[in-house]
Image: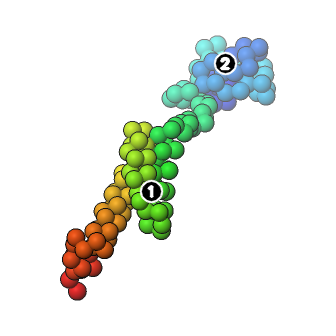
């Protein structure tokens, strides 16, 4: 017989693992039959829960079209400030709204919507000011 070094349970020689705590018993030496008490009791109380819990790798969700759309919308919103704003701002708004339907990057989608909408409004104000529909002080500030 073998005695588990963790919980003290006596098991048969063929057992590779302790049935109580799950410790590997392949390298535990045999206990002579004279040393085994008549009523074997464990040395320590059994451990709570399983002794070995296998670690599972974290689950990564695959990217969806909503995620790609969110990223595209945010990037288009930023690029619109540097040029071709009448193309990139509407693209940023539409792509970010489509990306908002996903559950992974909603914050980035909201940021893309806000950035593109503000940029589109600023561009509209500048066009209306150049066409003399808005006074100069309205677009440039009072100071």
Residue lying at 67% horizontally and 27% vertically, measured from the top left: 23
Pointers 2 and 1 in contact (CB under 8 A)?
Answer: no
Q: Residue at x 38, y 58 (%)?
A: 116
Between 7 and 59, the one lying in front of the other is 59
* 43 versus 92 height, above or below: above
Circle 2 — which element?
strand
Q: CA distance from mark 2 to mark 1?
A: 77 Å
Q: Image quarter for residue 101?
A: top left
* Location of residue 64 in the rendering, given as x and y in whole percent from the top left corner: 52, 37
Residue under label 2: 10
Q: Position of residue 142 (x, y in %)?
A: 20, 83
- Please tell me the numbered disc located at residue 63: none
| Residue matched to label 1 | 87
The residue drawn where x is 45% and y is 57% is: 88
Going from the N terminus, do you reach mark 2 or mark 1 first?
2
Residue 5: x and y in percent read 67, 30
Query: In the depicted view, which residue is nearer to us: 28 or 98?
Result: 98
Q: Give whichever of 74, 20 is nearer the camera.
A: 74
The nearer-to-camera label among 2 and 1 is 1
Question: On the picture, is 91 further left or further right than 61?
Answer: left
Q: Residues within 10 Å of mark 2 (few under 14, many from 20)?
A: some
Q: Residue at x 40, y 47 (%)?
A: 94
Asked if residue 19 can be seen in this view, the reply is yes
Q: Residue furthest front?
A: 131
């Amino acid at each position: 017989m073998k005695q588990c070094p963790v919980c003290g349970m006596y098991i048969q020689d063929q057992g590779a693992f302790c049935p109580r705590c799950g410790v590997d018993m392949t390298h535990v030496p045999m206990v002579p039959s004279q040393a085994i008490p008549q009523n074997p009791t464990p040395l320590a109380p059994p451990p709570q829960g399983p002794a070995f819990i296998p670690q599972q790798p974290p689950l990564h969700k695959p990217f969806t079209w909503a995620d790609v759309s969110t990223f595209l919308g945010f990037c288009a919103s930023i690029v619109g400030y540097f040029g071709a704003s009448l193309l990139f701002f509407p693209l940023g708004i539409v792509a970010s709204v489509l990306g908002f339907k996903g559950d992974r990057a909603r914050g980035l989608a909201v940021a893309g919507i806000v950035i593109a909408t503000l940029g589109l409004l600023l561009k509209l104000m500048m066009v209306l000011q150049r066409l003399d529909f808005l006074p100069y002080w309205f677009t440039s500030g009072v100071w």
